[in-house]
Amino acid sequence: MKENKLKDIRRLIIDNRLFSVLFFSVILLSLIAVIDNLMTIRPQDSLQWVRQNGFAVEKLYREQWYYYYLFMLFNLVVSGFNLVFSIKFFKSRHLNLAIVILIVTIVLLVMSIIFFNSLIVL
């Protein structure tokens, strides 16, 4: 019984190419984001400009390098949860909603990669 359900799901994924392309592109993009984060982060402090108070005084301070690992964790959490949700909707025959979730996930991952790379001061 369980094998028949898995075969049905596999057949649905193979038959629907748009879903499978988006699904695997989310997986690939999340792996690219993790590799990009791991290659960019250096274990040292980076200097950041920050406004200290309401009187427009700006100072330079040191930020810990492990803060940047939160972007990698965000990418993994967003892609993981949205892949699970898209599979759930795909199983329940809500294909359009599953495709929209995957497209939104791709947009979020691209925006996260761009934002992360703009934060890094090399």
Image (cartoon, rainbow, N blue to C red):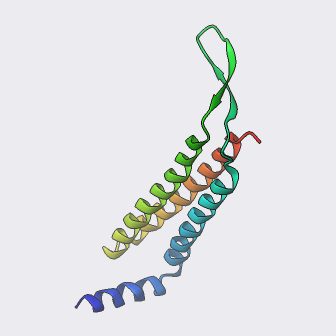
Which residue, as the protein is rendered here, is positioned at the far right? 122
**Can you tell which quarter of the image residue 11 is in?**
bottom left
Give the quadrant of the C terminus.
Answer: top right
Please say if 10 is above or below 23: below
Please say if 121 is above or below 15: above
**For the point 38% across and 66% down, which residue is it?**
84
Residue 55: x and y, percent? 63, 7
Residue 100: x and y, percent? 47, 62
**For the point 41% across and 86% down, which residue is it?**
10
Please say if 116 is above or below 83: above
Which residue, as the protein is rendered here, is positioned at the far left? 1
**Can you tell which quarter of the image residue 26 is in?**
bottom right
Figure disc tally: 0
Residue 117: x and y, percent? 69, 47
Please name whichever residue, 117 or 93, is drawn nearer the observer in this view of the structure: 117
**For the point 37% across and 73% down, which residue is it?**
90
Q: Image check: 7 left or right of 18?
A: left
Please name whichever residue, 100 or 10, is drawn nearer the observer in this view of the structure: 10
Q: Image check: 117 left or right of 92?
A: right
**For the point 53% across and 76% down, which residue is it?**
18
**Can you tell which quarter of the image residue 64 is in?**
top right
Please name whichever residue, 113 or 36, is drawn nearer the observer in this view of the structure: 36
Residue 7: x and y, percent? 35, 90
